[in-house]
Amino acid sequence: MFSLILKIGLFPGHFWVGDVSQGISLMNYLVLNAINKLTLFFVLRLICSELFNLELENLFSFLGVSSYIVGLFLTLTQRKLIRFLSFGSITHLGMVLMVFSLSDISTYLSFFYLTAYFFITYKFLILLRILTINGRPLTYLTDFSYLIHSNAKSNLVLFILELSGFPPYNLFILKLALLYLFFSSGFF
């Protein structure tokens, strides 16, 4: 189970995510951070609950909260855009892992959340591929200030707010639903 947690990039196996994400292309990043994690996440669910009948709610809750907190602090300390996104994905996965083993409804909601996260990330990465500054791709978060077209800058800011889960965006509503399931199950 630890090797799956390491491959997904959750706490305590989160240390490789930023470095690997920085060295690959944007579309490979999408495969690594969205599709790969979605698949491995459900393999983890299948192994723990279906095959071995393990009751790991407390462990998943601890790993989820820890990953959320570590991902949040690592995200806030980043200057490079891809590292910012990759550590933000740890935060999203921590949120999903908190409610992952509670019930079948939470599994479906987790799948829906990760799927929505995948499509929002995909749209954001497409926009990043299109935008350049003097022929070079956006690398740092401060590169947003150099964009001449205010429409492109506002689109990037809106995508970052959407990925962060600010209201009234879709991930905000899904985060509220995940937190409701988590707290209604007695995990305070």
Image: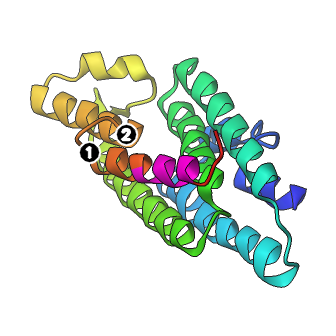
Mark carried by residue 169:
1
The residue that appears at 71% across and 55% down in the rendered structure is 8
Q: Pinpoint residue 37: horizontal percent, then vertical percent.
A: 63, 61
| Residue drawn 39% across the image and 53% down it | 174
Residue 8 is inside the magenta segment = no
In which quadrant of the rendered image does the C terminus lie?
top right
Queried whether the magenta region covers residue 179, the answer comes back as: yes
Residue interval drawn in magenta: 177-184
Q: Visible in this render: residue 10?
A: no
Query: In the image, what residue occupies the spot 63% across and 61% down?
Result: 100
Circles 2 and 1 in contact, beta carbons < 8 Å: yes
- Who is closer to the viewer here, 99 or 26? 99
Judged by its main secondary structure, the magenta piece is helix
Q: Is residue 9 above or below residue 157?
A: below
| Residue 165: mark | 2
Mark 2 residue element: loop
Q: Secondary structure at mark 1?
A: loop
- 49 sits left or right of 87 in the view: right
Q: Compared to 187, does 161 lie above or below? A: above
Badge 2 amino acid: Gly
Q: Is residue 1 left or right of residue 188?
A: right
Q: Amino acid at mark 1?
A: Tyr
Residue 145: x %, y % from top left? 27, 16
The residue positioned farthest toward the bottom in the image shown:
51
* Relative height, residue 94 to residue 109 (above, below): above
Name the side, left or right, on which 77 lies relative to 46: left
